Image (tube, rainbow, N blue to C red):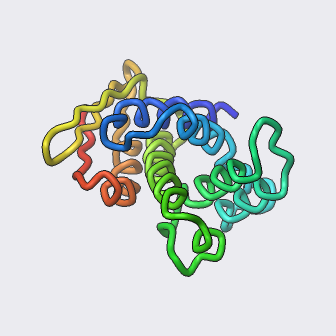
Amino acid sequence: MKHAEYVKSIALSIFDGLGQLHAMGVNERELLESASLLHDVGYLISHDLHHKHSYYIIMHSMMPGFTNNEAELIANIARYHRKSHPKRKHDNFAHLSDRKKNIIRTLAGILRIAEGMDRRQLQVIENIRIEILSNSVNVVIEPVAGSNPDIELWGAARRKFLLEEIIKRKLYFKM
């Protein structure tokens, strides 16, 4: 739970910082918050393919406070927090509207980076700040005093490509 709460906090900071680029609101923020908390629930079934198991569990669970459509979005965001990008050949993604596909791509892209920023599950990043430039975005991190977040920066950098595609800017991670 500590990892999930931390990933949620990082993901929401990224979402808020990128607001002028994605133009999403409180409803999408809530979807990201829920997907962040549930992204690893698939570990209950198996480590292998846990992202797909997370999708299955979320889709087949009661989600009080969410419509079936919202639960489907949350499930897809969690599904794409790792491995392949959303593809038209994926049954869970193919039938969705373009608007929903954009929401999933954007929020999954953010969740991927937030997950990478807790690669070792040690919560070594105290704070992040987003700097939006004309052709790029700097993600400036403030590490916890005395910590070395090199692995977390590496983890985030490996997972940045989906979000870069969506926001049409290069992402750079800096301390």
Name which residue lies at 53% across and 55% down: 104
Name the image quarter holding the N terminus.
top right
Residue 101 x %, y %: 51, 61
Name the image quarter holding the C terminus.
top left
Name which residue lies at 68% across and 48% down: 70
Q: How many numbered circles does the render carry?
A: 0
Residue 69 x %, y %: 70, 53
Which residue appears farthest toward the top when viewing the image? 145
Name which residue lies at 50% across and 46% down: 111
Left or right: residue 47 versus residue 108 is: right
Left or right: residue 45 versus residue 77 is: right
**152 or 27, nearer to the observer:** 27
Residue 159 x %, y %: 40, 55
Q: Is residue 41 above or below residue 16?
A: below
Left or right: residue 8 versus residue 37 is: left
**17 or 28, nearer to the observer:** 28
Q: Quadrant of residue 51?
A: bottom right
Which residue appears farthest toward the bottom when viewing the image? 89
Q: Is residue 117 above or below residue 84?
A: above
Q: Quadrant of residue 79?
A: bottom right
Q: Quadrant of residue 92?
A: bottom right
Name which residue lies at 67% across and 50% down: 40
Q: Is residue 104 above or below residue 123?
A: below
Residue 34 x %, y %: 65, 39
